[in-house]
Image (cartoon, helix red, strand yellow):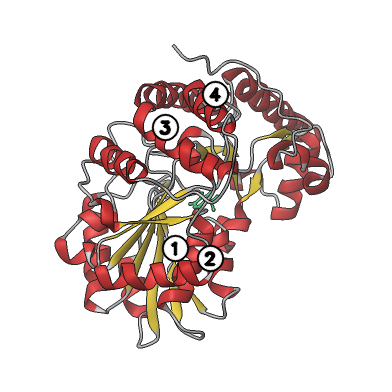
Amino acid sequence: MYNFDQHINRENTNSVKYDLRAKLFKKEDVIPMWVADMDFQTPEFIREAIRKEAEKDVFGYTFRSQSFNESIVNWLLKRHAWSVESQHISFTPGVVPGLALLVNAFTSPGDKIIIQPPVYHPFFASILDHGRQLVSNALKFENNRYTMDFSLLKSQIDQRTKMIVISNPHNPVGRVWSKEELLELSEICLKNDILMVSDEIHSDLIFRPHQHCPLATVSEAASQQCITLMAPSKTFNLAGLSSSFLIIENEKLLHRYNEILEAYHLSLGNIFGNVALETAYNEGEAWLEQLLTYLKNNIEWVRQFLVEEMPQVKLVEPEGTYLLWLDFSALNYSDQALNHFIIHQAGLGLNQGKGFGKEGSGFMRMNIACSLSVVKKAMHQLKDAIGQKKEAS
Ligand SMILES: Cc1ncc(COP(=O)(O)O)c(C=O)c1O
């Protein structure tokens, strides 16, 4: 059994999550439950593989061997019943850099690219920073559940619309898109010649009975017009190691992507990241199963606590990811006042909902990939703060 209760001190390690608190929250002792990495120890079998690699005498230019791709092929087959061919795998140091490369490879300045807010904030920048037009196909929110708005999507498409970027599963709202939803989306995109980019970085973090469906698998035609971005970084806590990958089954698209990867000289990657990815996928299943059980338990604890102790705050039921999307609108705060309250009264460092687009107004995103004792402490601090607010009003 792996121990997910163990406390790992991440302070003074240049950790974004911990050591940027003073700068970002103006309060250095908030409980950090924001940026998407986990407080759990990266599994020992991966740390051991990195240590072994570190014993080499030379760290010169190194290419990825065939076994790197094989570890991905086997993982995708085992975990997602997706049979991909080794030659359809390409590389990117990170998923967000990969997205920026795709925007540059397959669209031109002024082209329109669709996203579905509230959504992972770098999607906005990956489009706007490269001079493309952003089209917001906001998700629908009904009965505390998010769905894709297909009629809005159809009404927004025109000649300049070239690409859609989806988060599958969706950060921050926690939806695991169903095959039916993805099929409907793909049919609209196929009809209108829109390239589909599916960011599936959270796809290993799915709570049963939900199941990840890679967008590229919904039909043969979709597989030829879809590019998938994936990584072991969220799953195994490896975000600092910069090793991610793409699946591109259309040979022409693959060739074009590889050209741009070479043009920026990004294809070699980092030897430690490459060793970590391979080891994670070859040896990580048992660890991942235990992680999922632990995360699910944290979520269940939060859900029950909210219902019993803090019904004003509503949880949007997460089907995947360790990021909780919490609806604070019943507290009737402006976004600025809510943020101030969360930091200074509750002592928590969360992501503001509106950082994911204006549709996130009134929400906060909470990362519960930490020990249950920290989750409990955070929720009690929140409850006390809300209690004090009530007394004062
Ligand atoms: C949907 C999504 N894509 C990409 C990333 C980050 O990818 P990378 O660190 O590989 O650039 C995150 C991190 O939170 C994410 O949630």
- Considering the numbered disc 4 on the image, is that residue within a helix, a strand or a loop? helix
Label 4 to label 1: alpha-carbon separation: 30 Å
* Vertical position of residue 127 compared to residue 158: above or below: above
Ranked by sequence position, the earlier of labels 4 and 1 is 1
At label 2, which amino acid type do we have? His
Q: Which residue is mark 3?
A: 279
Ranked by sequence position, the earlier of labels 4 and 3 is 3
Residue at image point 57% right, 48% down: 60
Of marks 2 and 3, the one in the foreground: 2
Residue at image point 21% right, 41% down: 81
Asked if the residue under mark 2 is in contact with the one under mark 4, i.e. CB atoms within 8 Å, the reply is no
Ranked by sequence position, the earlier of labels 3 and 1 is 1
- Residue 116's label in the rendered image is 1
* Vertical position of residue 74 compared to residue 260: above or below: above
Residue sitting nearer the eye, 207 or 87? 87
At label 4, which amino acid type do we have? Phe
